[in-house]
């Protein structure tokens, strides 16, 4: 607990351009939760270098992501918005947790298997131990809840196991976190291959709507989305493309699938796709405007970066010192 509130932690990588999936599956929920919890939202740049990055591009994207957090409605006075690499406790706790993680556990991680297959020329140890760094992110702040998309559940399960394993040996040190999966938008699929999740690293740009896409591009991508030949607006597993569009529409308009199906009963796919396009535009246009405004306020963003890194470092340090003492590191001599 911090200030009598439960603690929430989440993070996003600054790799690639963020998609509508990232927004509806993560950012949008973050904003809803930000009043109820004491929140830490990190730009997890240390995770990003598990895949080779161009330094200048990474720096630029990290700043753009931090700005986007604020533009999406997270107040940096109330929410701790910071760069992971500015708080050394993440790496320090990750090392200790590495020594409590079994190779077999990491071998089972599907994200590792996927990324190793994609980057066969660079299967580095960081890619393998990535979930341990993620566990450190969460446990460092004694987070109670972690809003993530379904794809991150396996990593969260590992985090819980590590917390319980550590606590079983040393007493109640870590809060065991719970995942928070939003009701709508938990898994937005590719517009071109509805069996695959919409991803910022997809090679086909028509499969994803990027948060910075202009209105015409958004409308065009929705219009071209893959559907089926049934020709009837229904929300079912047999029509995965359409179901995905309904999910997108509902997440953008805060409606339920039943409401959407009723609203478009008897309409053709073309008409529905147009409505989806407009719904997405109405969510993304204001967001893009706020990003453009914030980009001009350099001094303000810099102060957010500085103040929140200090705040995060303070809370991280508290947990880290406890953990270091428990595992037997000698206390520092101060003064
Ligand atoms: P990549 O595919 O390049 O690995 P990504 O698009 O999956 O990246 P992440 O940085 O891994 O993005 O995810 C950031 C957050 O967005 C996570 O909480 C993740 O669960 C969520 N997320 C990502 N894609 C989707 C999606 N298609 N639908 C719902 N949530 C998503
Ligand atoms: N692994 C996550 C990003 C991430 C994260 C975290 C999410 C890193 N650390 C801590 C929640 C909590 C991803 O790839 N989406």
Image (tube, rainbow, N blue to C red):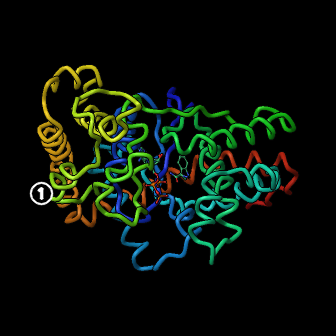
User: In the shown orientation, is residue 302 left or right of residue 139?
Assistant: left
Q: Where 53 falls versus 25 (above or below)?
A: below
SS of the residue at dot 1? helix
Disc 1: CA contacts within 10 A as few (<14), some (14-19) or many (>=20): few
Q: Residue 114's spot in the image, x, y percent?
A: 59, 59
For this rendering, which residue is in front, 23 or 64? Answer: 23
Quarter of the image where the N terminus is located: top right
Q: Where 331 falls versus 79 (above or below)?
A: below
Quarter of the image where the C terminus is located: bottom right
Q: Residue 31's spot in the image, x, y percent?
A: 34, 38
View extreme (front): residue: 229
Residue topped by disc 1: 216
Q: Where 170 falls versus 206 (above or below)?
A: above
Q: Residue 313's spot in the image, x, y percent?
A: 56, 54
User: In the shown orientation, is residue 98 left or right of residue 315?
Assistant: right
Is the CB atom of the residue marked by disc 1 within 8 angstroms of ligand 1's nearest atom? no
């Amino acid at each position: 607990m911090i200030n009598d509130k439960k603690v929430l932690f989440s993070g996003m990588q600054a790799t690639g351009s963020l998609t509508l999936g990232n927004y509806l599956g993560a950012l949008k929920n973050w904003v809803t939760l930000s009043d109820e919890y004491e929140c830490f939202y990190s730009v997890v740049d240390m995770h990003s270098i598990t895949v080779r990055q161009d330094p200048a591009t990474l720096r630029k994207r990290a700043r753009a992501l931090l700005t986007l957090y604020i533009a999406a409605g997270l107040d940096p006075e109330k929410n701790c918005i910071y760069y992971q690499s500015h708080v050394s406790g993440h790496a320090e706790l990750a090392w200790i947790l590495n020594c409590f993680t079994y190779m077999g556990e990491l071998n089972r991680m599907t994200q590792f298997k996927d990324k190793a297959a994609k980057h066969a020329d660079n299967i580095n140890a960081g890619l393998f131990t990535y979930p341990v760094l993620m566990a450190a992110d969460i446990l460092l702040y004694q987070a109670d809840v972690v809003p993530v998309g379904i794809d991150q559940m396996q990593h969260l399960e590992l985090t819980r196991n590590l917390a319980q394993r550590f606590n079983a040996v040393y007493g109640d040190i870590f809060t065991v976190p719970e995942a928070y999966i939003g009701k709508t938008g938990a898994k937005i699929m590719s517009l071109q291959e509805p069996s695959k999740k919409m991803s910022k690293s997809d090679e086909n740009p028509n499969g994803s709507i990027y948060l910075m896409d202009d209105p015409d591009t958004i409308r065009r991508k929705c219009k071209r989305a893959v559907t089926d030949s049934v020709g009837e607006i229904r929300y079912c597993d047999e029509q995965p493309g359409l179901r995905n569009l309904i999910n997108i529409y509902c997440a953008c308009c805060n409606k339920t699938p039943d409401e959407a199906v009723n609203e478009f009963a008897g309409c053709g796919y073309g008409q529905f796709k147009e409505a989806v396009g407009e719904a997405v535009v109405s969510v993304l246009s204001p967001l893009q405007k706020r990003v453009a405004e914030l980009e001009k306020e350099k001094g303000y963003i810099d102060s957010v970066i500085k103040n929140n890194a200090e705040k995060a470092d303070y809370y991280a340090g508290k947990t880290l010192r406890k953990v270091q003492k428990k595992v037997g590191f000698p206390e520092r001599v101060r003064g």
